[in-house]
Each structure stands twice: as C-alpha cells, then as structure tokens.
Amino acid sequence: QKEVEQDPGPLSVPEGAIVSLNCTYSNSAFQYFMWYRQYSRKGPELLMYTYSSGNKEDGRFTAQVDKSSKYISLFIRDSQPSDSATYLCAMTGGSNYKLTFGKGTLLTVNP
Amino acid sequence: NAGVTQTPKFRILKIGQSMTLQCTQDMNHNYMYWYRQDPGMGLKLIYYSVGAGITDKGEVPNGYNVSRSTTEDFPLRLELAAPSQTSVYFCASGGTGTVYGYTFGSGTRLTVV
C-alpha cells in the first residue's frame, strides 16, 4: 500500500460547483497536511496547510483532516475556471524536511 | 523576494551529453530538494539536502549528482544524458521550525534526444 493515495482524475465540473478533492494515507505518524495547486507548466504552490484533525477555511477553500480515518479533503466552493489546475496533497510527521506527496488530481472547471 | 530560481527553463540535450540545472533560493532555507515530474507519475524525489555540505539520495538518484556548497545554491548535474531523463525538473526549498511546506521553482523542461 502506498503511503499516500490520491485519485488522479481527471475531474471536470461546471463553474459554480462545489469540488471535493481527497487523499488517503497509511502512516499514522503524519500530523501536518498540505495542499498544493499546480497550474499547467508551472511549479506547485502551497495553497493551505493544517495541523492534526479539524477544518481550516481560507476564502472559497476549506481543508479538512480526519486522522481517525486517515483521510484529508480539500473543498472548493463556487469553483471558477481559474481553479483549473492539478491539486497535490502532501503530508509529514513532525519535521518539514521530508514531505510525502500524492500524485495529484487534475481539475477542470468549465465556464 | 525571488523565492526559488531555476535555470534554464528549457533545454534539449543529445544522448550522452551532460549539463547542470541551477537552483538558487533567497529565503535562507536549510532544506533543498530536486524532483522530477513525469505525466501521471507525480513528483519523484531525486536528491535532497538538509544544509550546506550535506546531501542525500531520494527515490530516483541514478544518473544524477548534486552538491551543496552554500545555503543558497543546490545544482543538479546530469551525466551522460539518456532519453529516460526527459522530464520536468523542479527544485524546492523548505524552512525549519514551525513553517511547513516547500517553495517550488518554476521548473526546467528537459528533453533528451
């Protein structure tokens, strides 16, 4: 079993839809969880990070962590065409020095 | 702040040639990384460094070498380029303490023909 599993998609939604992106993981030591957004032909950029379980909201984006199920989610409300990108989850235990990444989910938001 | 700067942005190499991909960061980060990204395969760690003078192999180090003589610079050397090294290469850096996550460069798109 891979440490981090992420459905590669592709996921295609109409503008204004609520998008749910997910990752599962197997390592119970993971405590810090991140979401990156990667536009085509660009480097990944850090979108959000959360510690342990719970929710974190930033504008239209909500990151959710359920450590009991080893499951993390990123919700995008009122999705826009500019949200079209690949979204990668990443996580680590107590140190920033070695993140474990998911393979990414390709999202397209259609006008 | 420039963040993480990679050069060149694009390069075509012939089989057997060598080249160095440059990476510089201006955030005084201790940790630096080289990844390659192939379509549908996610990010694969090639080499990483936890500080000047310290480097270690990632999951796909064969065919590559690195050095870290300063905090700012982390060049990746390709010796005897092969078609299997055709990929997009990303350099990233990360800090210590309570700030989590990496800052990535914009990538180098390499084609070996």
Image: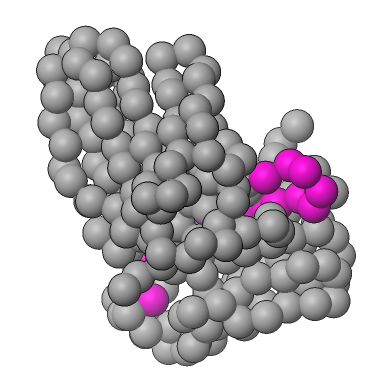
Count of numbered circles in the view: 0
Placement of A11 over or under B46, stated as above or below: above
User: Where residue A16 appears, x then y in whole percent?
Assistant: 21, 10
Q: Quadrant of residue A108?
A: top left
Q: How is the image coloured?
A: one colour
Is there any visible trace of residue A109 in the rendered image? yes
Quarter of the picture containing the C terminus of chain A is top left
* Residue placed most toward the observer, A57 or B63: A57
Q: Is residue B1 left or right of residue B106?
A: right
Q: Is residue B77 magenta?
A: no
User: Where residue A24 appears, x then y in whole percent?
Assistant: 35, 53
Q: Report the residue at 86% width, 65% height from top.
A: B70
Q: Is residue B90 magenta?
A: yes
* Residue placed most toward the observer, A33 or B10: A33
Placement of B80 over or under B19, stated as above or below: below
Placement of B81 over or under B94, stated as above or below: below
Q: Is residue B103 left or right of residue B41?
A: right
Q: Report the residue at 52% width, 83% height from top.
A: B61
Is there any visible trace of residue A86 in the rendered image? no
Q: Is residue B75 left or right of residue A49?
A: right
Q: Report the residue at 51% width, 32% height from top.
A: A54
Quarter of the picture containing the N terminus of chain A is bottom left
User: Where residue A13 appears, x then y in whole percent?
Assistant: 14, 24
Q: Report the residue at 37% width, 37% height from top.
A: A73
- The part of the chain drawn in magenta is B85-100
Q: Quadrant of residue A14?
A: top left
* Residue placed most toward the observer, A31 or A89: A31
